[in-house]
Amino acid sequence: MNGPENMLPNETSNGLENAAEEGDGRSVVPGGSGARTVTAVRGRLVWFCDDPFLVGTGAAMRHEKDGLLICVDGRIAYSGPYQDGIGRVPEGVKVVDYRHCVITPGFVDSHVHYTQVGMVASYGEKLINWLDKFVYPEGMKYSDKKYAEEGAELFCKELLRNGTTTALVFTSTYPHSVDVLFDRAAKYGMRIAAGKVLMDRNAPEALLDRSVEEAMEQTRGLIDKWHNKAGTRNVYAVMPRFPLACTRDMLTEAGRLWEEYPSVLMHSHIAENADEVFEGRKLFPECRTYLDVLDDHGLLRAGTVLAHGVHLTLGELDTCHRTGAAIAHCPTSNLFLGSGLFRLRDATTPSRPVTVGLATDVGGGTSLSMLTTMNEAYKVGALDGNPIDAVRLFYLATLGSARAMRMDHQIGSLQRGHEADFVVLDPRATPLLEKRTRTGDGSIEDVLFALALLGDAEAVEATYVAGRRVHQRGRKEEKATWSDFPFAWSRYDWKSGSWIPDQVVATTRGWRLPAIDAFAGGLHCVYNDPTDLLHWTVFTKKDDRPGTWSKPESLGVRSHASVALAPYHDLLYCFYSRDGKICWKSRDDQMAKPWGPEREIPGLSSQQPPAVTAYNDDLHVLAVDGERRMHWNTYHSSTGAWSGWEPWKDGNGDIVKGGWPSIAAYAGRLYVVYSPGADADVRWTARDPGGEWWRHRDLEGTAGTGQPRIAHYNGLLYAIGSWWESGKYQETWWAQQGVDVPEWTTPRSITQIRTGSFSGNGLTAYHGQLYTAYFTG
């Protein structure tokens, strides 16, 4: 449990370096190979490494009575005994104490309808009548985009309140019903699989696809727009509603579409109701069984998730096993509509196992709580002579559903490397639960069973998505973002020799260090929003009138570090780090869509933002690798080619090590500042054209600065940064240097501004003045 496989990424023998606490258990760790977001929680850990229906509960479940979970940049870096792991927690990172709770992977709902949250608990009838009377009329309301947005927002919040971090979701036939759900999922950082519903018969005309061709065209557009989109965790699923609602042509084209996009999922309903099966056999008499309707149209294989399966025959379960199709068990819905009892024992028999996940199926189901759904699954099993123990119930709600959705390598576990989605469950949440668990035998199996049978949303102490807490029981409104700070700016007043106070832009929020530079008459800024999606805004000022910032626009990419900007040869260049790759976009103000496509500079992996500037007719980029070694690269627009990464060496021939560099051209020279370590002063150097680099020297009095920045203005070179001590913000400093006297002035505090979130300050000259931009704490 505690060997090298659980080492933190880029960990040194001294652990990670000084951390700036975020206030909810997350911390931003500067230095090393780049700032990382770290979460550490302590509690009773439970997860699964195999299927208990096949190997037994003892071999399938992992349990740490006093466990520690360390998450770095949204992934699990360590899970194991607290005593073995506490030494790996970075200095300054607060360990959130949940020792009274059980921590499991976030719940994975393998079948649910967000478009039915408004009619849940509508008086039950049999399936077909219930669809006509309640489901389809509610679905038609989603033709109104605003109504769809309200439904998606409520749905995502309710999932998180119930401890569900991933779901396979039916939408409606309207394409914007998919857009708004994926947009909300990205806002909360959730992993959601969804798709446009395909149906062209046996429903109100306003809800039907107008043609198979249009439905396929819309679906292709949505796949291209959302499936595995950079900066999101969205996954697309092809979704023919069920055979009764689809013509042969629709099913045929859905099968062809899935062949065209094999990485998406396929999701439908099957054999939920006996009348449905009877009608399906009449509509497709050429098919040997009802399930064969989907098989004959190429819709059964690994990645297929079929909701219900109540009335599948043993032969049809054989087909699921042969093809790899999974079943979403929906016990609450099956009971509410009187559809029948799913035979879990027949599906999971070791001689011919079918992958099964657990699902709420709201609004046939009456609760989005997976704990409540476990309760119903136990009762369904008991009525079938097969009561299900707690270990198997929790497996179905986590790793089982993840396997059904082909996501078990990403979610559903607390194993190292998995996405850090987890739920904290409180066995003392209600007086009855506390009494029951206090008088039980104390085993983890008994505690889990009590939670499954007596728990609901009230038992969810907290929900974490990608290592960040997005729900805390008892709070009226949860922050659903990694960090959320107001954007602010200031400028240096030459006459008074001081900076103007914080100018807060109320409509713009985010974190990290925003990059600013002057280009095409405006002051351009690219920054990380609260979910690390990059946004662009521009400040325009004319004469002596106050300037204004434009409405932020998304660049459509996410960066796990701050960004760098530089104008060069009539374009504005933006560089950033994504998944260890150094990427860039360029902007042309003359184009209708000014930001070009994402491109990559190959050959170097980096988790830090590169530094960039134009100098001597080339674009220069300085970047830091995983060992904190710096490398140089240049680009010339006439050739469109990079020179290639070369180690940046000092006068002694040693590769320079450090972090968070900033470069600027000034007085014919190229200047660099960087941070060699958390406790050391910022270092700086310069080079004359064609000459050697000067000796690297300290900018004294700047120890503890994470992200220094430099820019030239009014004949001087300026530096700015923020002091940090014991992981907390102190204040912002600035210094100057002249070309004739290449020494920095003593750093002075800027008392008029406050930089927060370990974000640092962007710095540049614009409109005859010196500007800084930052996120204020």
Image: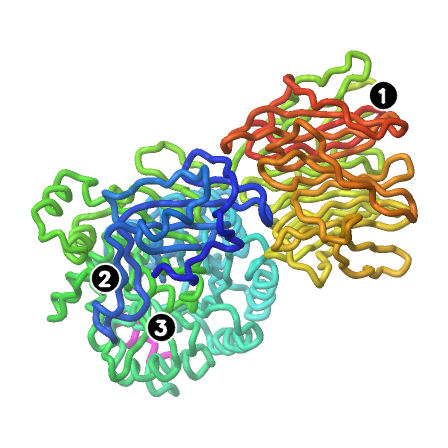
> Would you name the residue on which mark 3 appears?
326
Q: Residue at x 28, y 66 (%)?
A: 329
On residue 113, which mark appears?
none
> Would you name the residue on which mark 1 appears?
543
Badge 2: residue crowd in 10 Å (few <14, some 14–19, many ≥20): many
Q: Is residue 689 above or below residue 725?
A: below
- Inspect the image, locate mark 2, and give the three-letter code of the amino acid beneath it: Leu
Residue 334 in view, yes or no = yes
On residue 393, which mark appears?
2
Q: Quadrant of residue 94?
A: top left
Locate residue 487, reporting x and y percent: 62, 30
Give the dominant element type of the magenta stretch: helix, strand or loop: helix
The kind of secondary structure element at disc 1 is loop
Q: Residue at x 38, y 64 (%)?
A: 402
Q: Residue at x 47, y 60 (%)?
A: 194
Which of the pair 95/376 is nearer the observer? 95
Residues drawn in magenta: 273-283
- Inspect the image, locate mark 3, and give the three-letter code of the amino acid beneath it: Ala
Q: CA distance from mark 3 to mark 1?
A: 66 Å
Q: CA distance from mark 3 to mark 2?
A: 17 Å
The kind of secondary structure element at disc 3 is strand
Q: Quadrant of the N terminus?
A: bottom left
Q: Quadrant of residue 554?
A: top right
Which of the pair 31/402 is nearer the observer? 31
For the residues labelled 3 and 1, say whether their Cβ atoms are less than 8 Å apart: no
Is residue 201 found left or right of 125 in the rendered image? right
Q: Residue at x 63, y 17 (%)?
A: 751
- Inspect the image, locate mark 1, and give the three-letter code of the amino acid beneath it: Asp
Is residue 531 found left or right of 59 in the rendered image? right
Closer to the chain start, of discs 3 and 1, is 3
For the residues labelled 3 and 2, say whether their Cβ atoms are less than 8 Å apart: no
Closer to the chain start, of discs 2 and 1, is 2
